Image (tube, rainbow, N blue to C red):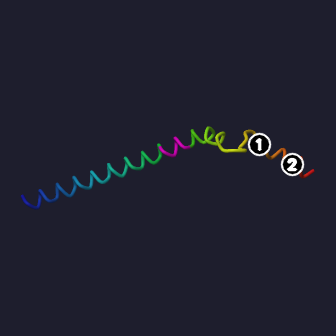
């Protein structure tokens, strides 16, 4: 009986660890998804950051 209870506890702890790991991974993926969606908004807040590569075109004109 004692051995059976120890085995049950070990299996229960393993399940808790597995669930916690999945939750952490899911939270991390959610964080990365959120950063990806907000990336363009954040870029507009960066000084001299432009959209559609206009900086590159100006650089190309300066080089010509």
Q: Quadrant of the N terminus?
A: bottom left
For residue 32: magenta?
yes
Query: Which SS class for mark 2?
Result: helix
* Mark identifier at residue 23: none
Residue 18 percent across, percent down from the top left: 32, 52
Tell me, yes or no, whether the highlighted magenta stretch contains residue 53.
Answer: no
Magenta region, main secondary structure = helix
**Helix or strand or loop: what does disc 1 sit on?**
loop
Residue beneath label 2, please? 60
Q: Quadrant of residue 40?
A: top right
Q: Is residue 10 above or below residue 33?
A: below
Q: Is residue 61 or residue 23 the one in the foreground?
A: 61
Farthest right residue in view: 64
**For residue 6, side relative to residue 51 (left or right):** left
**Residue 39 appears at what percent x and percent y?**
60, 42
Q: Which residue occupies the extreme bottom position in the image?
A: 3
Residue at 86 percent across and 48 percent down: it is: 60
Residue 42 lies, in percent from the top left, at 61, 41
Q: Are marks 2 and 1 in contact (CB under 8 Å)?
A: no
Q: Name the residue at 42% across, 49% down.
A: 25
Q: Would you call the spot at circle 2 few (<14 residues within 10 Å), some (14-19), or many (20 or more)? A: few
Circle number at residue 53: 1
Horizontal side of residue 42 vs 28, given as left or right: right
Q: Is residue 60 left or right of residue 24?
A: right
For label 1, count other residues whose C-alpha is less than 10 Å away and answer few (under 14), some (14-19) or many (20+): few
Residue most extreme to the front: 47
**Residue at figure coordinates x 51%, y 46% from the top left:** 32
What residue sits 45% from the left and 48% below the top? 28
* Image label count: 2
Q: Is residue 1 above or below residue 34?
A: below
Q: Nearer the viewer, residue 51 or 33?
A: 51
Magenta-drawn segment: 31-35
């Amino acid at each position: 009986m004692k051995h059976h209870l120890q085995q049950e506890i070990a299996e229960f702890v393993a399940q808790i660890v597995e669930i916690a790991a999945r939750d952490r991974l899911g939270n991390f993926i959610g964080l990365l998804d959120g950063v990806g969606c907000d990336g363009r908004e954040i870029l507009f807040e960066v000084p001299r950051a432009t959209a559609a590569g206009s900086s590159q075109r100006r650089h190309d004109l300066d080089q010509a």
